[in-house]
Image (cartoon, helix red, strand yellow):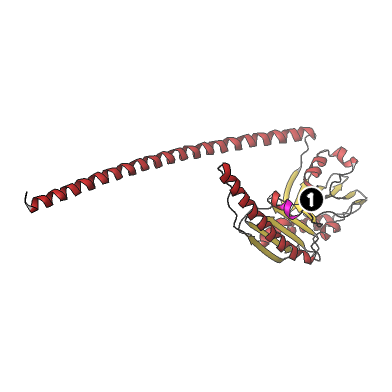
Amino acid sequence: MDLFGRKRDRTIAQLEETIARLRDENEILKERFERMAEREKRALAARQEAHEEVKRLKEKLQSWKRMVEREDASNTGGISLRRYTVSKAKLFEILRVVASIRAERETLQTIYLQPHALPPESLLHEYPQLEKTVKTLATETGCAIFHDHNHIIHLLIIPPFPITHPIHQESTEFDTEPLSRLFDNTHPFLVVIAHAGDSFVMLATPNEVLLEREVHSSIKSKHTKGGWSQRRFERLREEEIRHHVGKIRDVIRTMLEEKPRYIVASGDKRILKELFTEEKNVILYRKLDSTIEYVPEKILREVLTTTICIY
C-alpha cells in the first residue's frame, strides 16, 4: 500500500474512533436528560400534590373556624367578641372619644386589670366570654375595660405594655389617663428579635427609635443525613449558635445601660431562653413579623399595636 493509502486508513480509523466516542457521549447525555426529565416530572407531581394538600387544609381550617365560632356563640348566649388591632395614633383617637363621654349618673365603669387578673364576677356573670378573652390575650399586659351600665359602651383594650396599678371605679366619666401614661416617652424599652444567623436589637420610646443594631453570623443550615457526619455537623452548628447568642448578648448589655422599662422579645424560643435566663427586666414575648430586612420604624409601629375588643 502506498503512503497515501496508509494515511487514508489512519484518517478513517480516527474518524471511526471519534464517531464511537461521540455515540457513547450521546448515550450518556441521553440517559442524563432522561433522568433530569424524570426528576422534573416527579417534582411537578409533588408540587401539584402539595398544592392540593394546602387547599384541603385551608378548607378544613375554614370549617373548624366556622365550627368554633358557632360553639362560642352558643356558649355565650349568641354574644361574641369583635376584635381588631389599632396603631398608637388610632388608640389615642379612641381614648379621646371615650374620655369625652359623660353620664348624668355614675353608670360609667372603668376597670384596669393587671396581668393574670380577671374582671369582677358581676361583669363575668353578664358577659362570660370575657374570661376566656382576658386569659388568652391579656396574661402578659393586663387590660382596661370601659363599661356602661346602660349597655351603650362595652370596650376592652389590651395595651402593648403592662398595666401597673389596678383600678375599679364607677363615675360619670371614664378614666383613660392610666392607658395614656403607658406610652410615656421618659422610659425607653428594648426590642429583641432573635433568629439563628440574623437578629435585631432596638432601643426605643413610643415616639422614636433611639438605637438599633443588626447582628449577623454565619450558621450552617440543618443537616438531614444521619450518622457520625450529622452529629459532627450539629456540634459545629451548636457552637455557631452559641457564638451568635454571645454577640446578641453583648449588644443587649450595652443598651441595658439606658435602663429600659421592658424588653419585647420575639423569634426563636430557644435563643430567647438562652438570652434571658438571668434577666431581671420584664420580658414581654410577642410574635412580631419575621423578616430579614429589619426596618426599625416598622418594628416600632408593630410593637405599639393595641388590641381592641367590643363585647
Q: Is residue 279 magenta?
A: yes
244 relative position to 148: left or right: left
Identify the residue at image location x=43%, y=40%: 39
Q: Can see residue 232?
A: yes
Return the residue at label 1: 158
Mark 1: give few (<14), some (14-19) or many (20+) Cα within 10 Å. many
Identify which amino acid the numbered label 1 is placed on: Ile
Identify the residue at image location x=72%, y=60%: 249
Identify the residue at image location x=68%, y=58%: 299
Quarter of the image containing the C terminus?
top right
Q: Can see residue 311?
A: no
72 relative position to 222: left or right: right
Q: Is residue 175 magenta?
A: no
243 relative position to 184: left or right: left
Residue 182 against residue 17 in the figure, above or below = below
136 relative position to 113: left or right: left
Residue 284 pos. (x, y %): 77, 53
Q: Secondary structure at mark 1?
A: strand
Residue range corresponding to the magenta coloring: 272-280
Residue 210 pos. (x, y %): 72, 67
Q: How many dots with numbers?
A: 1
Residue 192 pos. (x, y %): 71, 57
Identify the residue at image location x=30%, y=45%: 25
Q: Tell me which corner region of the image, top left, top right, bottom left or bottom right, holds residue 28.
A: top left
Residue 216 against residue 12 in the figure, above or below = below
Residue 35 pos. (x, y %): 39, 40
Please tell me which residue lies in front, 61 or 232.
232
View extreme (left): residue: 2
Please tell me which residue lies in front, 233 or 244.
233
Please tell me which residue lies in front, 62 or 225.
225
